[in-house]
Amino acid sequence: MPATGRYTHALISRVPPTFQTLKTIDGSCIDLERARAQQERLVGCLRDLSVDVLELPPDDDSPCSVFINDCAVVLQGIALICRPGGGERLADLATVRSVLRNELGMNPVEFGSNTALLNASDVLFTGKEFFVGLGRETNTEGALVLANTWPEYPCTPIKMDGCLHLRDRVTLAGPDVLSVSSGTISQTILKRIEREASHRYQTLTLPEEDAANSIFVNGTLIHIDATEAPESSKLFCERVDYPQISVCLSEFQKTGRGLSSICLLFKKSKTIRTL
């Protein structure tokens, strides 16, 4: 069983000028330079935690390319190339596939079906089992592909409400600790997870919706800054007894996406597995 939250590598796709054209939740404009500074801060944090970060050049033809985590699930020497965006983000997938193969020596696994859909941001791996959010960009057939790729782990589909992905609402904030907001939709999804889970988890319930999306990296919890989620930041300090780093993420959150969506984290295995 892999150590929870242990990573050696991360892929990050730099912010392109067209990122500014993405639709925002409240209609506000994305500050391009601020987004780039926020992304650079995250890159620095990951490198400080001994993660080898590969920064991909900005893709002006794909403003969603910054959400690189959507593209693949990488675990125990296997890289599953997903089909986010209803199968429309082919250029993003090609880039991630090429980097995994040519830079990291992996043999990416492809979907064998044109009807299966899977956005990797709908995949929550706890170190013991998978939960897969079924919604706009992930269907039952896609969840089955994931389950067949790693048959050694239980894989449970979770019906999603609203337009966000599973890991935009629930993330792993530490060993056996799930981070979730106090919002009605998020709490409903948490109850579905708890009802179907093969293992028991502690929960960290946060007052601000955006704060639930955190990443646990090599023993340290990275979460959004107190300037953006003051009550949740206070709760993190009170409830979490391992190291923490805070980052600002306002420009990405304007699109409804969270911290985990803008970096693809994985531990490179000494043995590359093939299926």
Image (tube, grey):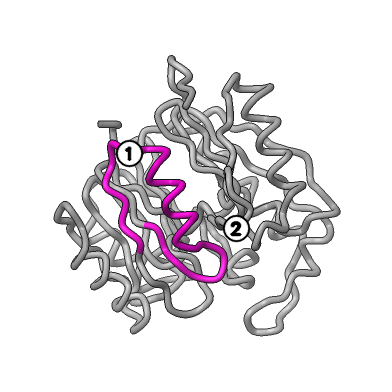
Closest to the observer, 89 or 14: 89
Residue at (53%, 55%) from the top-left corner? 118
Q: Specify start and end residues of the magenta stretch as a single range.
A: 132-157
Asked if the stretch drawn in magenta spans residue 139, the answer is yes
What residue sits right under mark 2 in the picture? 115
> Which residue occupies 60% across, 58% down?
115
- Picture residue at 66% right of the left edge, 35% below the top: 97
User: x and y percent of residue 77 in the render?
Assistant: 45, 25
In the displayed structure, does residue 163 sit left or right of residue 214? right
> In the rendered structure, does residue 149 fall within the stretch colored magenta?
yes
Q: Is residue 28 above or below residue 153?
A: below
SS for dot 2:
loop
The foreground one among 46 and 103 is 103
What residue is shown with label 1?
Answer: 151
The circle on residue 243 is none
Q: Amino acid at mark 2?
A: Thr
Select label 1 or label 2 by which is in front. 2
